[in-house]
Amino acid sequence: KAGVTQTPRYLIKTRGQQVTLSCSPISGHRSVSWYQQTPGQGLQFLFEYFSETQRNKGNFPGRFSGRQFSNSRSEMNVSTLELGDSALYLCASSSGQGGYGYTFGSGTRLTVV
Amino acid sequence: QQQVKQSPQSLIVQKGGIPIINCAYENTAFDYFPWYQQFPGKGPALLIAIRPDVSEKKEGRFTISFNKSAKQFSLHIMDSQPGDSATYFCAASNSGGSNYKLTFGKGTLLTVNP
């Protein structure tokens, strides 16, 4: 059974640019969640999607957005990048019950210069 | 507002020792408490989880102890090995609620010396 696949693994962007990260969940999982991981703040919840609907959003500025497609694949977008957006962005998939049975991908390491 | 507090931030033990990592939560609506293990360059992996209707759960060398009245739970690693060296995160969620997220502690960096 394939795990959660995140692409790309590494990204270097310049301040002011925008970036799109991709996540393919485990087959059959309809919930996809995104987290930002930094040394200072730890794992912070960004948003959760289930069957193409955003069910919850964390406390992040509107520059952070996401979407989910009919095949459950998800993308997140960060516009007008800031230095502080440098982080590991993790995607997790599950069957959909809150927080239960999350499987994380290996993440996308974003560096903003 | 940090809803799950984890301690210690780092921990060093000798091989065979029993490291203990503690977490405390505030939200009484939480009813699912997983622990995750993360190695460098990898995403967190679910290690073991507990619900508040039991006070202890064991899976192999890993044990969760849960104290509902104190709103605390802890992870014990029996006969620790150098391969257990990783960062450990506790988390909590309201699995039947409508916020659909895990709230994580800040993590504990465990080093097991040979």
Image (cartoon, helix red, strand yellow):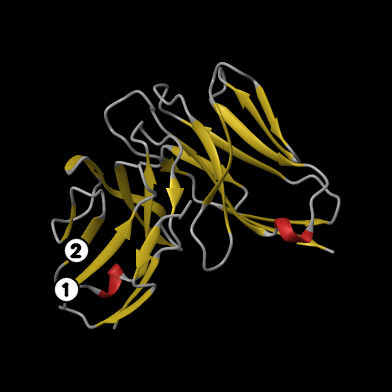
Tag 1 subunit = A
Drawn side of residue A18 relative to residue A100, left or right: left
- Give the quadrant of residue A11: bottom left
Q: Give me the disc on residue A18.
A: 1
Rendered view: B80 above or below A16 = above
Lower sequence index among marks 2 and 1: 1
Drawn side of residue A94 relative to residue A48, left or right: right
The residue closer to the viewer here, B27 or B38, is: B38
Name the quarter where the C terminus of chain B is drawn.
bottom right
Look at the numbered discs 2 and 1 and tell me whether their residues touch, using CB distance below 8 Å. Answer: yes
Q: Secondary structure at mark 2?
A: strand
Name the quarter where the N terminus of chain B is drawn.
top left
Task: For label 1, count other residues whose C-alpha is less than 10 Å away and answer few (under 14), some (14-19) or many (20+).
Answer: some
Q: Give me the disc on residue A77.
A: 2
Drawn side of residue B102 relative to residue B15, left or right: left
Which residue is at a point 24% across and 48% down the rendered structure image?
A: A59
Mark-to-mark CA distance, 2 and 1? 7 Å
Rendered view: A101 above or below B12 = above
Name the spot of residue A8 as percent of width and height, x first. Answer: 34, 72
Name the spot of residue B5 as percent of width and height, x first. Answer: 50, 41
- Give the quadrant of residue B14: bottom right
Kind of residue indicated by mark 2: Asn
Kind of residue indicated by mark 1: Gln
Name the spot of residue A66 as percent of width and height, x first. Answer: 19, 55
